[in-house]
Image (cartoon, rainbow, N blue to C red):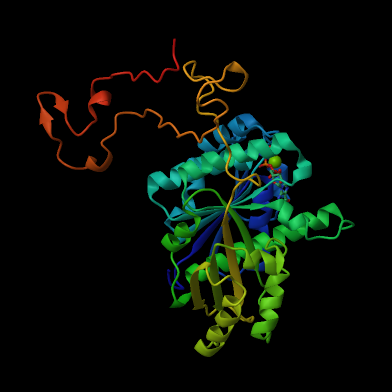
């Protein structure tokens, strides 16, 4: 964790992400956050009242949205890489975007690759569309998420459905999004504060990454607003009502979780201990908890709690069964015959994609050369041998 002289960069991408960034700016003005919003849509950006905005692809996107075209979003962001990277010197960059559209999704992958190349600490907090936005949008968001996870290792994806299922059906639509934006802004702010705080016990990105490792995770977030004089029990009750969390069940079902508490300078070890004890009891004894706690001089409210729960995402259907033998004429199955393995469905081993010649762990070491050949590069790559995977004529 950094100290109070450090800053945290918040970067909102696309319309949804920018609105969350604006929410952080409005609600947490003193926190040492460096807040920027970037979108191709100039009017949407102008309506936010943020001092730092980046109009992506201004020369050719003409200040318009991308109409859900991720490639346009990517192209627009690629031309503004420098501006998007301006906060990379901070202790942490937190990127927020709603996946499923064009600008935010496209820009997120550009920013992820830029941060990876620069070695900058970065967290992505992204939302997945609500079911009623349609299957096409959801599939597009899934694809954007897959790409993002390839380029970045700290990606927290929360399902907007979790939020909307916790609201009354007669909640007006604008209020529903306003609630989402408020909760996401509080999450970003508490997350940033945890990284800026004087640690009572520290939390770092490696610990967060360890929660997200091991396959796609179904993540939920819960946050409290820091009401003054709230008792530990009241804070836990407030946390359970946090709309993205899924209530007490959301915590009880978690396989692992981050539990962070950040308070003002008066927060004592005793208070922290009591609060952590109450929070512990919300989780299964088998859940792996990563904890952090600290204080920040700028906090005048009561302690704020942030919880990120993780559970392996089985896509709601359990592990998918793949037919290993579908295209193998030597093995008959189903109506094709009565072979020994007839009807067998077995899991399929993923195939490694062939990559550019790579030095792998030998990168940066002195090459072992014989003549012109670098023996640190695998032979099949060095000699350009094509491996017959049985997929080409
Ligand atoms: N939290 C939040 N999510 C939003 C909001 N508006 C849209 N979303 C979600 O974010 C997803 C992407 O929408 P936008 O952010 O409007 O899209 P964009 O990135 O601006 O992309 P284009 O408009 O296609 O250029 C949507 O499918 C919604 O699920 C909002 O105000 N708040
Ligand atoms: Mg837009």
On the image, the x and y values in percent for residue 377 come to: 23, 31
Quarter of the picture containing the C terminus is top left
Which residue sits at x=85%, y=60%? 168
Residue 8 appears in view: yes
For this orientation, the residue located farthest to the right is: 170
Give the left or right position of residue 320, taking residue 203 as reference: right
Residue drawn at point x = 41 percent, y = 60 percent: 206
Q: Which quadrant would residue 89 be assigned to in this image?
A: bottom left
Q: Nearer the viewer, residue 368 or 118?
A: 368
Residue 273 % position (x, y): 53, 85
Q: How many marks?
A: 0
Can residue 50 be seen? no
Residue occupying image coordinates x 73% and y 70%: 241
Q: Residue furthest left?
A: 371
- Foreground pick, 240 / 117: 240
At which x and y percent is residue 18? 65, 51
- In this rendering, is residue 341 above or below 190? above
Q: Quadrant of ligand 2?
A: top right
Tell me where residue 344 sits by quadrant: top right
Reply above or below: 68 against 127.
above
Find residue 311 and report its horizontal and vertical position in percent: 57, 57
Q: Above or below — where is 391 with respect to 318?
A: above
**Is 104 on the left or on the right of 112, as rendered?**
right
């Amino acid at each position: 964790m950094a100290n109070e002289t450090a800053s945290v960069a918040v970067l909102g991408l696309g319309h949804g992400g920018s609105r969350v960034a604006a929410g952080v700016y409005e609600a947490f003005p003193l926190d040492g956050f460096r807040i920027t919003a970037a979108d191709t849509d100039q009017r949407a950006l102008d309506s936010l009242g943020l001092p730092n905005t980046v109009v992506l692809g201004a020369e050719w996107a003409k200040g318009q949205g991308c109409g859900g075209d991720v490639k346009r979003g990517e192209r627009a962001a690629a031309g503004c890489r420098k501006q998007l990277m301006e906060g990379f010197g901070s202790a942490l960059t937190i990127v927020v975007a709603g996946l499923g559209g064009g600008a935010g999704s496209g820009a997120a992958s550009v920013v992820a690759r830029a941060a990876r190349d620069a070695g900058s600490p970065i967290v992505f907090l992204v939302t997945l569309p609500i079911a009623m936005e349609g299957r096409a949008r959801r599939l597009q968001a899934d694809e954007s998420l897959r790409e993002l996870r390839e380029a970045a290792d700290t990606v927290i994806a929360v399902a907007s459905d979790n939020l909307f299922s916790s609201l009354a059906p007669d909640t007006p639509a604008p209020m529903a999004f306003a609630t989402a934006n408020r909760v996401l802004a509080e999450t970003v702010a508490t997350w940033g504060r945890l990284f800026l705080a004087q640690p009572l016990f520290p939390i770092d990105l490696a610990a967060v990454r360890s929660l997200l490792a091991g396959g796609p995770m179904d993540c939920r977030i819960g946050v409290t607003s820091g009401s003054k004089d709230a008792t530990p029990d009241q804070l836990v009750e407030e946390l359970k009502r946090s709309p993205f969390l899924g209530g007490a069940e959301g915590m009880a079902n978690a396989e692992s979780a981050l539990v962070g508490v950040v308070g003002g300078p008066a927060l004592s070890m005793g208070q922290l201990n009591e609060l952590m004890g109450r929070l512990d009891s919300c989780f299964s004894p088998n859940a792996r908890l990563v904890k952090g706690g600290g204080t920040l001089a700028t906090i005048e409210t009561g302690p704020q709690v942030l919880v990120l729960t993780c559970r392996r995402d089985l896509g709601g259907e359990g592990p998918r069964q793949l037919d290993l033998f579908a295209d193998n004429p030597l093995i008959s199955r189903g109506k094709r015959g009565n072979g020994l393995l007839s009807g067998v469905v077995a899991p399929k081993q993923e195939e490694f994609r062939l990559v550019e010649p790579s030095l792998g762990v030998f990168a940066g070491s002195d090459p072992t050369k014989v003549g012109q050949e670098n023996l640190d590069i695998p032979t099949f790559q060095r000699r350009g041998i094509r491996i017959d995977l049985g997929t080409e004529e």
